[in-house]
Image (spheres, helix red, strand yellow):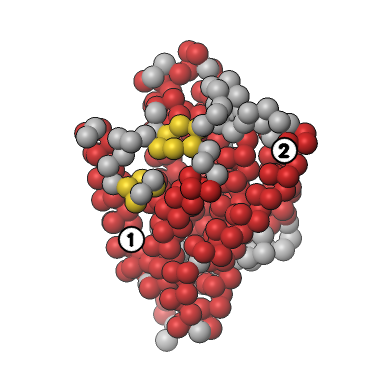
Amino acid sequence: MNPVYLVLELAATAFFTGVAWAALRRGRLPFLELVSAAAFGVLLEEGDQLIFETYHYNPDWVLAIDRAPVVIGLSWALIIAGAMRLTDALGVRRRYAPFVDSLLAISLDLAFDAVAIRMGLWTWRDIGPADGWFGVPAGNFYAWLFVTLGFSLMTRWLRDAAARRPALEWLQLLVPLPAYAVLLLGLIPFIVVKPLVDSAPGGGLAIFAITLAAFCAVAAWGVWGPDRVAPDGQRTAILDLRLAVATRLAIHLYFLGAIFYLGIFADLPMLLLVALALLAAEIPLAALVHARLRADEPAPGVRASLAEAPD
């Protein structure tokens, strides 16, 4: 048993437990969304390893369900929940929100996946360290877009339906199944096209880039287009907004520290530049969220009137 892995898993589990308790205090649906996101993460990791067999995890992970480390499922939940909270705070409509959520999630994976494999957390099969994106297959990044898209799409639809019929909230526990189906359907174009245009191990970066551009176009319209709604989400959010931002920063800083600690920055300076650039991108993101929320706040006199108004 590797004590480093055990300490990491116990710390992450304790943190997730605290987040789950805070979500439960906010309401039943936020708690169910967080739990289902964690279940989705475990299903995702187990299913992908069984179906595609493209990677495997380090055997030093202690808390695991078959092939899927529990902490990875919990991490998926925090990443997706944090992305959804930020998107809601930006006032993005439901029809565009899953695309924004997907971009917020992939911005984390682009920063850490190539670092994680050099830390030995997991290993990609049949791909060299120079293949794909520094040893990470392009299909992984492509899949990340549809992982988040599927869960966000189903969860947001159910969230609106449950607002009218609260009994439907319990269906959130089944969301991982259709969300995984969305992922599998989304992978079909990549699986079909990749052998035709890029048969190299880990190839398909052009396909990912084109798909990413399409997601960016939809997300940009949702964030900056005229078809926006008031920033919202505090009451129904899975995560507190500050916690969502802090979680993203913690992930960035953890793997950035690994880049320096393992000396990756000297051998692969591009990974350092990408990690720093994506970390820096969190600053304008946080500023935009703050500006949207401030713009939506009532003036001081209006706030006072609202506070004095009878229920």
Q: In this view, does 227 lie above or below 167?
A: above
Tell me, for residue 194, which label it has, or none.
2
x, y percentage for residue 103? 60, 47
Q: Which residue is drawn at 55% across and 23% down?
A: 128
10 Å crowding of disc 1: few (<14), some (14-19), many (20+): many
Q: Which residue is drawn at 60% across and 46% down?
A: 143
10 Å crowding of disc 2: few (<14), some (14-19), many (20+): some
Q: Which residue is drawn at 53% across and 22% down?
A: 129
Looking at this view, name the residue that lies furthest to the top: 266
Q: In this view, does 191 lie above or below 233?
A: above
Q: In which quarter of the image is residue 156?
A: bottom right
Looking at this view, name the residue that lies furthest to the bottom: 310
Q: In this view, does 279 lie above or below 266?
A: below
Q: Disc 1 versus disc 2: distance between alpha carbons?
A: 40 Å
Q: Residue at x 47, y 74 (%)?
A: 171
Can the viewer see residue 293 in this picture?
no
x, y percentage for residue 73? 40, 51
Q: Quadrant of the N terminus?
A: top left
* Left or right of 137 in this view: 255: left
Q: Is residue 176 above or below residue 102?
A: below
Using the image as rendered, state which of residue 257 and residue 53 is in the foreground: 53
Residue tagged 1: 20
x, y percentage for residue 88? 55, 60
Using the image as rendered, state which of residue 263 and residue 27 is in the foreground: 263
Using the image as rendered, state which of residue 207 and residue 308 is in the foreground: 207
